[in-house]
Image: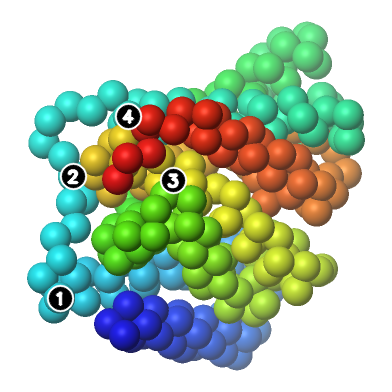
């Protein structure tokens, strides 16, 4: 019952927050910031909203964990190599997603990333240089700002719910948390078209598939890293750099390409298979 109460508060606050932002955006922000220069402000405003959105589960989890006297280990004092492995996994995930997407989308050498930084005569060299600059910048923001906001979610999903659901075992726990995690995104998707703007119901379904498939990976890093900050590093890094798996292609079909697309699902399944084959690492 306590878990249901905690989740109820999480979803109610999430819906109220989303509705408040929607009304603020529709009647105050957008009408006064409609030209091209001011639209940058709208974009930044939405980024601020979505970043705070990620901390709703964390704040609720911290409140109820303290009330229930549940200790949530956010940081670990001793060095743990999985801090680095989490960031490395995000890089591997992004590269594999791009690789698997190659048969289904055309690389965009002349527009997009290569337009940002042109230092070479070769289009291909400009493309590679731009790619690695954005990768490096993405990793920097991924392990700093993005990890902070990712931590807001992870305190709930791999913190509070981990303590509540670990009695079910690794894979069932991953399934339950994955479903809840995916449903929590529904207000954001249905209201603002997050990820797949033109197919919002489908986007909700795809998000739940994404969270179910990725949940065991995040749990794996929580268990091996022994602190919530480790899956938060994975979360932040993926959010920061996985946009490259879309940006490098032209005419992207978001249903097919990206971490919340079919090619991304294939990569998550490969990660899950790797974890399954390492059964000795799943002791909770």
Q: Quadrant of the N terminus?
A: bottom left
Upstream in sequence: badge 1 or badge 2: 1
Instruction: Please tell me in which quadrant of the rendered image residue 284 appears.
Output: top left
Say which element carries label 2: loop
Q: CA distance from mark 4 to mark 1?
A: 29 Å
Upstream in sequence: badge 4 or badge 2: 2
Crowding at dot 3, Cα within 10 Å, few <14 / some 14-19 / many 20+, comes out as many
Q: CA distance from mark 3 to mark 1?
A: 24 Å
Upstream in sequence: badge 4 or badge 1: 1
Q: Which residue is mark 1?
A: 68
Say which element carries label 4: helix
Q: Identify the residue at horizontal 38%, vertical 39% (top origin).
A: 282
Query: Vertical placement of 44 versus 259: above or below?
Result: below
**Residue 82's disc number:** 4
Instruction: Please tell me in which quadrant of the rendered image residue 173 appears.
Output: bottom left
Crowding at dot 4, Cα within 10 Å, few <14 / some 14-19 / many 20+, comes out as many
Q: Identify the residue at horizontal 87%, vertical 35% (top origin).
A: 105
Q: Which residue is mark 2?
A: 75
Q: Which residue is mark 3?
A: 218
Q: Nearer the viewer, residue 258 or 272?
A: 272
Q: Nearer the viewer, residue 107 or 95?
A: 95
The x and y percentages for residue 8 are 40, 85
Q: CA distance from mark 1 to mark 2?
A: 20 Å
Crowding at dot 2, Cα within 10 Å, few <14 / some 14-19 / many 20+, comes out as few
Q: Is residue 246 visible?
A: no
Q: CA distance from mark 4 to mark 3?
A: 12 Å
Q: Identify the residue at horizontal 64%, vertical 26% (top origin).
A: 95
Between circles 4 and 1, the one closer to the viewer is 1
Say which element carries label 3: helix
The x and y percentages for residue 119 are 67, 14
Q: Is residue 76 visible?
A: yes
């Amino acid at each position: 019952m306590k878990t249901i109460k905690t989740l109820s508060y999480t979803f109610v606050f999430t819906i109220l927050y989303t509705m408040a932002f929607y009304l603020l955006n529709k009647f105050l922000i957008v009408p006064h910031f409609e030209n091209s220069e001011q639209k940058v402000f709208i974009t930044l405003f939405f980024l601020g909203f979505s970043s705070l959105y990620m901390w709703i589960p964390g704040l609720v989890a911290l409140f109820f964990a303290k009330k229930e006297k549940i200790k949530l280990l956010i940081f670990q004092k001793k060095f743990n190599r999985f801090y680095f492995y989490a960031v490395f996994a995000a890089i591997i995930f992004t590269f594999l997603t791009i690789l698997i997407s190659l048969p289904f989308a055309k690389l965009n050498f002349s527009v997009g990333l290569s337009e940002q930084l042109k230092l070479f005569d070769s289009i291909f060299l400009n493309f590679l240089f731009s790619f690695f600059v954005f990768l490096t910048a993405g990793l920097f923001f991924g392990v700093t700002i993005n990890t902070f906001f990712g931590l807001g979610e992870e305190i709930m999903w791999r913190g509070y719910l981990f303590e509540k659901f670990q009695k079910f075992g690794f894979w069932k726990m991953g399934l339950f948390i994955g479903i809840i995690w995916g449903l929590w995104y529904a207000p954001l998707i249905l209201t603002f078209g997050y990820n797949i703007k033109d197919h919002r119901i489908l986007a909700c379904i795809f998000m739940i598939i994404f969270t179910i498939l990725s949940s065991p990976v995040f749990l794996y890093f929580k268990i091996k890293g022994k602190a919530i900050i480790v899956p938060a590093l994975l979360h932040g890094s993926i959010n920061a750099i996985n946009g490259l798996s879309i940006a490098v292609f032209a005419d992207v079909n978001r249903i097919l390409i990206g971490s919340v697309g079919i090619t991304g699902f294939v990569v998550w399944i490969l990660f899950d298979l790797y974890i399954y084959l390492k059964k000795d690492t799943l002791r909770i």
